[in-house]
Image: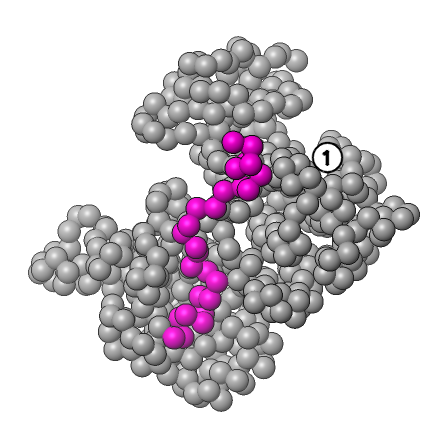
Amino acid sequence: MKQPTQLEFGSIVGERYRIVRTLGSGGMSRVFMAEDLKLPGKQWAVKESVAGPQVMKLVRSEAEMLISLSHPRLPRIVDFFEHPPSGAVYLVMDYIEGITLEAYMKGYQGYIPQEQIVPFALQVLDVLDYLHTRQPPVIYRDLKPTNIMLTPEMEFILIDFGIARSYKAELDQDTVKLGTVGFAAPEQYGAGQTDARSDLYSLGALLLYLCTGGKYSEWTAGVEGYIRGELPRHLIPVIRKLLRQHPEERFQSAGEVIGELRHSADFKLAQQGISVNDASMDYAGTRVVAVLGVSAGSGATHTAIAVSHYLARRSRSVALVELHSTAKAFARLQEVVEGTSVGQSSSSRRFEVDGVHYWRQTSRADVISLLGGSYKFIVLDLGSGQDNERLEEFLRADYPLVVGSGAEWRVQDIAGLARSLQRHPQHKWNYCLPLATSEAVRRLRKELDHDKVFALPFHSDPFERDDEMDQVLDELFRGVIPDTRRRRFAFLKRQR
């Protein structure tokens, strides 16, 4: 097998990326920081790996799979190319500023604050849930401290997808046995094919590693004595179930673990003045709010506008996207804003109202490009359509919001939608009922067994501030608007 090219400072790869420095290396791959010659000031991480002719087809298919992923806790893969003379292949992805979880643990002598462990687990579960619910499911297979990056804003991001794979139901075992000893599930070493439950085993190993100060990642005799005494006791049975040897004895999905942690952690975190939802949503970067109407006329666009201007008043850099190539609402609004005649909208699909950037008749590809910009929030107006493209964007959003009629005889429409999509995790969903009574909200909360159901008050002008509407949105988005103060790692300060 050929060796990678000898890249060094100043080398240019792909006729676009100039190497700045080496970020890390291992096995048959190296990762470099590179500057973009076409986008001055933009930095990327470039991963160089060796791929012989016999596995090149597999490498290409895996690269295509990675490029299709879009989640705030995953670096975006933006380019892939080959260098046939050397047998090297290159993945270009987001450069993440920060340190690995392993380095963070070392900086605190193996100690991570106990109040961060459940929120951390929920963040990891959030991205695992996203990967595992792809079609086909994506199995990460190498969850460990060195593959988790911690940003200065305390955002956890998974890196290094070198051995991720798409799950193939027809296989009994993996063709290649890969993973890190101590964190990989038993089936990664010949006992069967890896699936979502394999990643959940690795999560259990990672949590045990954090709870024992980095001493253990496998449940062995006497390990209980090394688990820190101040940790929430409910974590122990969760970790033990995650670490069962047989996949069928573990939790069966990330959503199931999320439900268990939310149920058992509520009281403990409430005592500290922190909600589980607040903790799990506290991360930096662009976040997506998706607004889906149950039926035509339910008020999805009106609600999306109100939400966007609310977020713009409390945060900054908000984009409101009309994700429908034939929708007309934003075109009419643009005519009013720009003072043009009916049917004479500007050729530009972007216009601005009170600090919110409106994007009319936008495609999914445009949304992906916007995620790489400077917006703190992107609000997707999905209308009432449930085609595959819009439904997938709703399901992958950080904050999915369902809008249904508040009329007594239409409230059941929301319950019907939830039942029709019951195969998808719904723990992140939020439900809004314009003009609904408190009794209607109470009944729907009970029927859905979900506390994030809200009645929206009468709000004639969604562009303007309304005290009653703000009170409801304050509760709906509690913990979502980030603290913009930049936090640094204390142990790094001590070293300066």
* Vertical comparison of 258 with 453: above or below: above
Please provide the residue range marked out in magenta: 471-496
Q: Mark 1 Cα within 10 Å, few/some/many (few <14, many 20+)? A: many
**Where on the picture, by quarter, is residue 115?**
bottom right
Name the residue beneath numbered marker 1: 179
Q: Position of residue 419 (x, y in %)?
A: 57, 72
Q: Is residue 97 left or right of residue 107?
A: left
Between residue 348 and residue 157, name the one nearer to us.
Answer: 157
Left or right side of 2 for 233: right
**Residue sitting nearer the eye, 236 or 4:** 236
Residue 361 falls in image quadrant: bottom left
Residue 71 percent location from the top left of the image: 50, 47
Q: Is residue 45 magenta?
A: no
Q: Judge left or right: residue 413 versus residue 338.
A: right
Looking at the image, which residue is at 34% across and 70% down? 303
The amino acid on which the numbered mark 1 sits, given as a three-letter code, is Gly
Up/down of 88 relative to 227, above or below: above
Kind of element beneath mark 1: loop
| Residue 194 appears in view | no
Magenta stretch encompasses residue 478: yes
Task: Tally the numbered discs.
Answer: 1
Q: Quadrant of residue 11?
A: top left
Q: Residue at x 29, y 75 (%)?
A: 466
> Compared to 405, does 273 lie above or below?
above
Horizontal and vertical percent for residue 250? 78, 55
Residue at image position (66%, 67%) is: 268
Residue visible at 44% across and 46% down in the picture? 486
- Is residue 113 found left or right of 277 in the rendered image? right
Q: Is residue 240 above or below residue 7?
A: below
